[in-house]
Image (cartoon, grey):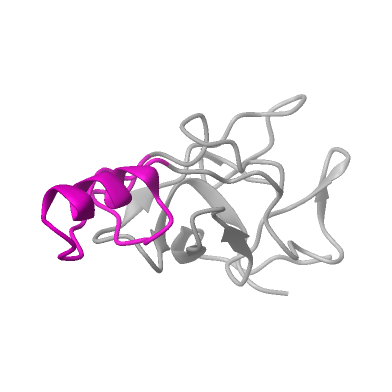
Amino acid sequence: MGFPVLMGAQIMCTNGLGPGNLIVIPKGPPVMMEGKLVATVMDFAPFANIPPFPMCNAPANPTVIAATAAALGTPTPAACIPATVAPWTPGSPTVKCGAFNVLNNSSKLQCMWGGSISVMNPGATKEMVP
């Protein structure tokens, strides 16, 4: 089943230069586990749920393109601008929080700049039970 992802879980992008922390926004009555809000696959909104990572290396990110151009073509990391447009996948196949699948530690989230965001530390110490 995996571990549920909770508010403040550590996340990382393949194009990021450091981790970030997931922000969970309840989509109905808040569901808590271990004193923290439980995340769902719908917690994917840029900035609201996915904060900027420290820096970005994605060649498609407009800030990286500009920084690389300013460095006369030398690939240059720049500010992260999360661009997530679809829910996390796959989420828990059996555990729901309201109408949405609970986010688990094996779920991934795609950024339209080319990165893949994964859960490094879900924040939960207990596995999900269906």
Q: Give the range drawn in magenta.
A: 52-81
- When asked about the image quadrant of residue 13, the answer is bottom left
Q: Is residue 120 above or below residue 63?
A: below
Disc count in the image? 0
Furthest residue toward front = 72
The image shows residue 5 at horizontal and vertical percentages of: 57, 55
Q: Is residue 40 above or below residue 46?
A: below
Q: Which of the 4 image quarters holds residue 26?
A: top right
- At a point 32% along the width and 60% down the height, the residue shown is 16
Quadrant in which the N terminus is drawn: bottom right
Left or right, 48 with reference to 63: right
Left or right, 113 with reference to 28: left
- Residue 39 x, y percent position in the rendering: 63, 45
Residue 120 x/y as whole percent: 42, 67
In the rendered view of the protein, which quadrant contains the C terminus? bottom right
The part of the image, by quadrant, that contains residue 27 is: top right
Tell me if 5 is positioned left or right of 91 in this view: left
Q: Is residue 65 magenta?
A: yes
Kindly give the residue lying farthest to the left in the view shown.
Answer: 71
Q: Residue furthest top?
A: 29
Left or right: residue 67 versus residue 113 is left
Q: Is residue 22 magenta?
A: no
Main secondary-structure element of the magenta-colored stretch: loop
Image position, residue 73 (x, y; %):
18, 62
Q: Please state which of residues 15 and 36 is positioned toward the viewer in this rendering.
A: 15
Q: In this view, does 118 lie above or below 103?
A: below
Residue at image point 70% right, 65% down: 128
